[in-house]
Image: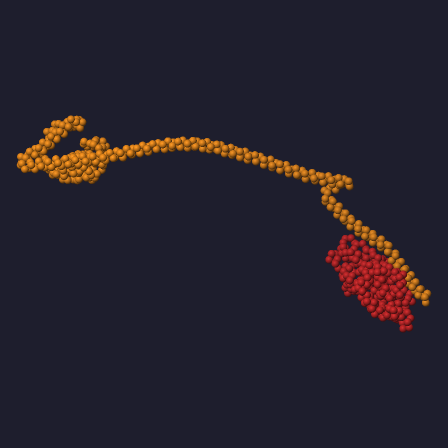
Chain colours: A orange, B red
Amino acid sequence: MATAEVNWREEILTKLQKRNKIQTHCFQDLIAQHNKIFDNVNALKHENLQLSIQNEKLRVDGDRPAGGGGDSRLHEKIQILEQKLLSQQEELTELHRRKGENSQQIIDLNAKLQEKEKFLMARDISLAENAAKIASLQAEIALFDRNNKELNLLNEALRDEHQALHLAFTCLEDKMRKLQDENRQLLDRLMKYKTKDADRMNEENENFLNDGSKQLVRSTFGRFRKRFAKMQKEIEEACRDTRGVSPEDLQEGYGPVCQSTIPTKASVKFDAHDGEVNAVKWSPVDRLVATGGADRKVKLWEISKGACESKGMLVGSNAGVMAVDFDASGTMILGASNDYASRVWTVADQRLRVSFFVVMFESIGFVSNAAHHS
Amino acid sequence: MANDREILREVWEGKLPISFQLDPDEVVELQQPDPFYLMVPRLSYFPLVTDKVRKHFLRYVANDKQDREMWLEYDGQPMKWHYPIGVLYDLLITSDDQLPWNITVHFDKFPENQIYKFSNKETVESYFMACLKEADVLKHRGQIASNMQKKDHNQLWLGLQNDKFDQFWAVNRKLMEVSQEQEHFKYIPFKCYLDDGYRQKLIKPVDEDGRRKTLQDLINEMFPGKNVVIKTHGMIPPLETPLQWMSEHLSYPDNFLHLCVQT
């Protein structure tokens, strides 16, 4: 039994061993070797691939593949250096360019600077001119100041003078007023004397009327005589004063020869004024007569064929009118009164035109009619 | 008792040289790929050893087919990946002259109606563990395998996957032990391979008299009146070999006896 068991077991073991020997051991090493080689091949393939990739990369990297191994390194170095050189050259050119730009900039700036300096100089010049102008203007100002001061002084002096004159003027005015008062007093006194005279004459007239026609003739005569005497006196005066007679007058036959034409008969008689008639004058152009009387009026009369007609009354005088006169054209009348004033009226509208004072006068008249009208 | 390490060792170390070749119709590169040689353990399964093969051939096929499942073909027949490699060899190869074993690799036209799909190694693992538990049910009413811890299962699987004899047998030994009250397994787990598949039957290791059954008894029970030759592990075991001993020593890692029947 035991040997039988051993037999089948041994047989199985042998068969298994034989199997393994044929199927396994024959191939184990071979396959292992193959696998090893296979792996190696794969690894080498991979490596090869990587190397070729690297090679390609290097080929791309380096422009020209180097000849030898040592050479390649040298070549690489040279290339690197060349690259460096190239970059340096680029940098250099860049720097040159920048330098050129900078110098250009400097030139520009210099030009600008010069311009500015010129400008500055011009400014300086103008400044100096202005300073000179200022100085001259200041001198002028000083001059004007001085002038002003002088003028002020002058003005002061003139004012003083004016004041003094004013004082003198007021003084004189006072004096004048005093004199006017005196004059009025004198005038009053004169009037008084005149009224006294008139009273006496009225008395005489009454006496004469009472005495009869004889008396009338006598009085008329007396009156004529008185008037005659006065006339004579006037004539004498006129004769003495040859100045008043121009040579033309003499040539035309006026003069003493005319004495023979003394009016003897009154063609018109009228009462011109209240009181005395102090002045009478013919108009040089019309048949007008101007009379001035003690009633302080100047009256105009038109005389025609034995009748007289009042043409107007010129008022304005403060005292009796002592003289009247026409101008050469007969448009204006000059009247002198006892209030030391003379006045001018126009004939046409009988208005007072001018009034002026003359301190003392004997008679009046238009100085030169021709001159006045020219 | 499973203590004949010499036999176990010889069985474990059985390896086959295989030459993998890509189907020339599927090559898209200009260069034909080299065949890929590999020593594969007889006890292992193809999905566990073909990672390198797949990697090697992947770059020779069209891009859109690279993600597809790789499958193997020999002599016009797709390989059943859920058979151990040794079983496939014993079934398909009759003479050792054909070594190394030429196998064609395919990526395209997966024959879904002939072989199962396996998406990853977990599929193989779950199939393997299912076989293991089935065998244990036959041997010990499933008590040992179900009492094992998860890490023992893992150790079994990793031992097989990494071709680690000691790691595997440290756990597998428990599965091969007999219970104390009985000196033998309840039934012998085995698969008899014919041309069109495999047959199974409940066969006890001893007969009613307590006599130990041999391989001859098994053949008689399975194929009565026929003259057949049983082949396993690349050899023809003697007919007088006891079934209990065969189950303990000549079982594949899934604890089944895989018997190729040659008429």
> Image height check: is B60 above or below A299?
below
Residue A234 horizontal/vertical position (percent) = 14, 29
Work out whether residue B97 or residue B187 is closer to the camera in this orientation and state it: B187
Work out whether residue A111 or residue A176 is closer to the camera in this orientation and state it: A176
Q: What residue is rendered at 83% in x and 67% in y?
A: B144
Q: In which quarter of the image is the C terminus of chain B?
A: bottom right
Question: Is residue B237 found left or right of A167 in the rendered image?
Answer: right
Count up the numbered dots.
0
When asked about the image quadrant of residue B87, the answer is bottom right
Q: What residue is rendered at 76% in x and 41% in y?
A: A73
Q: What residue is rendered at 40% in x and 32% in y?
A: A145
Residue A233 horizontal/vertical position (percent) = 13, 29
Q: Is residue B261 visible?
A: no
Residue B203 horizontal/vertical position (percent) = 86, 70
Work out whether residue A200 or residue B99 is closer to the camera in this orientation and state it: A200
Residue A31 horizontal/vertical position (percent) = 85, 55
Q: What residue is rendered at 18% in x and 27% in y?
A: A243
